[in-house]
Structures are given as structure tokens and as C-alpha cells.
Image (tube, rainbow, N blue to C red):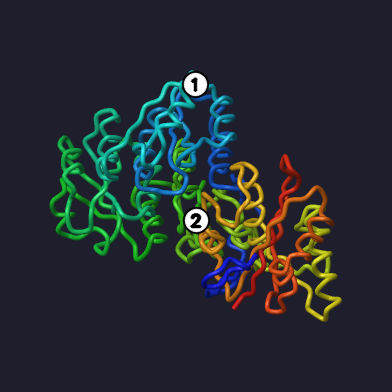
Amino acid sequence: MAYNKKILVSLFIILLISGLIGGVALAGEDLQIERFYGSTRIETAIEISKAGWDKADTVILARSDDFPDAMAGSPLAFSKDAPILLTLPDRLPSGVLEEMSRLGAEKVIILGGTRAISSSIETDLKKMDINTERIGGSNRFETAKLIADKLPHYDKAIITYGNNFPDALAIGPYAAQKGYPILLTETDSIPKDTTKALGSVTSSIVVGGESVISSQVKNNLPSPERIAGTDRYETAVRIMERLGFTADLIYIATGTDFADALTGSVLAAKENAPMLMVRNDSIPSLVADVIKGETKKVVILGGKNAIYSVVENDLGGSSPGKTVESNPESGLLLLEEDEKIMLQLINEQRTNRGLAPLKVHEGIREVARIKSKEMIELEYFSHYSPVYGSPFDMIRHFGYEFSTAGENLAINLNVENAHRSLMNSTGHKRNILNESFTHIGIGAYQGIWGKYYTQMFYTPR
């Protein structure tokens, strides 16, 4: 199939590409690196839960693809010794149900109203004899206030900008440990629900600069102090410095998305660790300076589609880029057997026609695998993902920008027949033999009806 302005014929996109960055080792061999991850943010949350909890009476449940209701949830989760798990808006993934069963959860607290997380999820949980409680206001400000109402008595509050997530998540471990609510504000005015939640508060911490929370708002808060940097990355470092965290153990998450930092914040709080932010493909200089100091262990939250392996390599002392060649063997080593065979079949077709073979890109390989696995778990077969949207949206979501890209999908009992069916389709064949493409990611997962194959083609600009 492919896209043009009017008809779905093939899937091509035109984007800009960000620079590919090599790395420099930040620490010696004594630095310990651990990564908690799954193939999706939902699975990453499950892995974080497994790492931090052998059992839990209560689980906090938040929506996986939107942050407003969830970003004030860390203090509540910590007070309940509860992991934060993620769900689709209208159904609970099977892995989440299995994790609740492993934990022996007796209660699930849902963050957000029924427009955020469907009432059908409550019904499903009750069928499993799990009690439910929903904390959801008419907007994010009221939801944060209602979460605060569930905390034990507090006389100090954290104030963050309500229309973005980084500052709230960076201070999440500290707020959780101290039992301070995270309340939300507009840039130039304090919402009425936030004002109500401040009734017993005698002092406050404002997180973020004047571009997100104005001096007027700050001056109307009880005994405020401001912690801010020039950007989200520096703000997280300043939080660590000002609030008494040591650098022995550091949690890092991508600064461009909310889910991994949210679900990891409670575990970081349990281990008295700060939450720092990195870019998908590089470590900001201030964060690097912290790690170069006395850090003994870094915990990375999220898979290599969220924080690329180049970042992990930089932490550990090696410095490859993100693109891996498929010839010689280095790219093939990234692939499972059927993925490897499919790449060979594709490149045979291209070589026979005088075209350059495609190279494997490890990040796009992970995105392709996520797409194939998601189609199986959510029982669909379409270029449109119910979690990430169109292939355009999905690729952008994971931080990749390209000059051109395309997607092929197939289901078949064996890889040779899958390849043959794609070559017999005009639009799919056009992608495979497109001379403008230089790289590929292939994801193959076994489903009920056969193996699901996703081919993602693209060209760096």
C-alpha cells in the first residue's frame, strides 16, 4: 500500500532528521549500568514493577499515552507502596493483568476520569475481584487536587506547570519521599482547585523558570522557593543539587516523553535516587558532569527506542553511532532469524536490480518490532496504531526524523511466503525497490494466524 494526498497506496513521509551523534565515555569501568525496559512503555512499566515489588496490595493505574492526570501520582503511589502501571484508554493489556496477579493486588486506583480511562476497565477489574477507586477531576488541576486530598497531612507542596510534564516528573521522587503533593498551575494564574489544595500549606517549591511559572504566580504562593534551569535537563540537575540527593545512584529517563519517568519515579524514590533527563541520542553536558563525578550506578528507564544504545555506550565507555551496517555481519547480528532472512531476501532483490543493499538501523528495528508485537496484542492489522497513530506519528513519537520513509506489513506462516506476497503487491514492491531508501528496520513476531512482519524503510536527510 502507499500514501499520496488522496489515496492510500504506499506509506512515505518527508521529515527532517536530527544529527547522529557519536559518544565519549563518561565514566570508568566501575560504573554499573542497569536498564529496565520492555518493547512498549506499558511493558517497561511492568518491568519496573517487577524490579521494585515482589507483592503490592495496591496498584496505581494511569493512561499510557497522555500525561495530565498521571503526573501528580508519584506521591500517592509511594504512600501506598504501589507501582504505577499503564493501560490503554479502553482496555487493559494482558501483560498488565498478569502483573497485577503476580503482585497479588487487591485494589487498583485509577488516575483520571472515564474519558481518560474507560469505565469498562473498572468492570473488568471487578470481575477479577479487584477493588477499584477512581481519582479523576474535570481537568488536570482538579485531578491533582483530588490526589493531594488522598495524601496524609502535608504542610508543603510542589508547584509545577500543568501543561507539560518534565518538571513534575523530575521532582517526582523527592515529592514522593516527603509526601508532598504535586500541584499544577497555569503560567500566569493559579487555578481554583490548586488554591483549594494549598489551604494548609505553609511553604512551597516552584519547579521551572519564569517562562512556565511567572513571578506573579510564584509571589502568590506560600513561602515559595524556585528551582529552575535553562531547560528541563538542567532543572532536573538543579533539583538533585538543591534537595539533598547524592550522585551515587542516578535514574535517567528520556526528557521527551513522560511514561518511563512516571513509572520509574516511585522506584527511584524507594532507592533515594534522583531522576535526571537525557535526550534520546545524547547526554546533556550538565548531566554528564554529574555522572563523571561520584556516580557508582545508573539505572536507565526505557528501551532503546526511548534512550538509544549510543547513550548507554557513552555511559559505559564505547562510542558507536546509531546506524549499524547490514554488510558485513554487524547489522545481521541485530536481527532474529526470520528478520535476518527477510533482510537477505530484500537485498537480493535490490542487488539483482543494481540497487544498493539496505542497512539495518537499530532504533527503527525496535520501532518495527513494537509495531508487530502491538498488532498481535491489540488484535489489529493496519498501518494505523491505536496507541501511536499513523506510521508518521509513530516514527515521530520515538524521536526519529527522516527525509523519506515507508512501511510494509505482512502476515504469513513463513518468511519466504511473506516476502513473495509483498513482492507481488505493487505498492509494497515499490518500497522494497525504492532506490531512495538506504536503511531498514524489520520486526517479526509470531501471532495466532502466522508471523507478523513490519518493514520500516527510511533515508536520513
- Crowd tier of the residue under label 1, counting other residues whose Cα lies within 10 Å: few below 14, some 14–19, many 20 or above: few
**Helix or strand or loop: what does disc 2 sit on?**
strand
In the rendered image, which residue does mark 1 sit on? 127
Query: Does residue 258 lie above or below 267 as drawn?
Result: below
Does residue 197 appear left or right of residue 73 in this picture?
left
Asked if one can make out residue 34 in the rendered structure from this viewpoint, the answer is no
Where does the image place residue 63, in percent across and percent down from the top left?
44, 42
Residue 123 image-quadrant placement: top left
Disc nearest the viewer among 2 and 1? 1
The residue drawn where x is 49% and y is 59% is 278
The residue drawn where x is 83% and y is 69% is 328
Residue 149 image-quadrant placement: top left
Does residue 349 appear left or right of residue 409 in this picture?
right
Identified by mark 1, the residue type is Lys
Identified by mark 2, the residue type is Thr
Asked if one can make out residue 12 in the rendered structure from this viewpoint, the answer is yes
Where does the image place residue 343, in percent across and percent down from the top left?
79, 63
Query: Does residue 349 lie above or below 365 as drawn?
Result: below
In the rendered image, which residue does mark 2 sit on? 254
Residue furthest to the front: 7
The residue drawn where x is 80% and y is 74% is 350
**Helix or strand or loop: what does disc 1 sit on?**
helix
Contact between labelled residues 1 and 2, with CB atoms less than 8 Å apart: no
Query: Does residue 428 lie above or below 351 as drawn?
Result: above
- Mark sitting earlier along the chain (2/1): 1
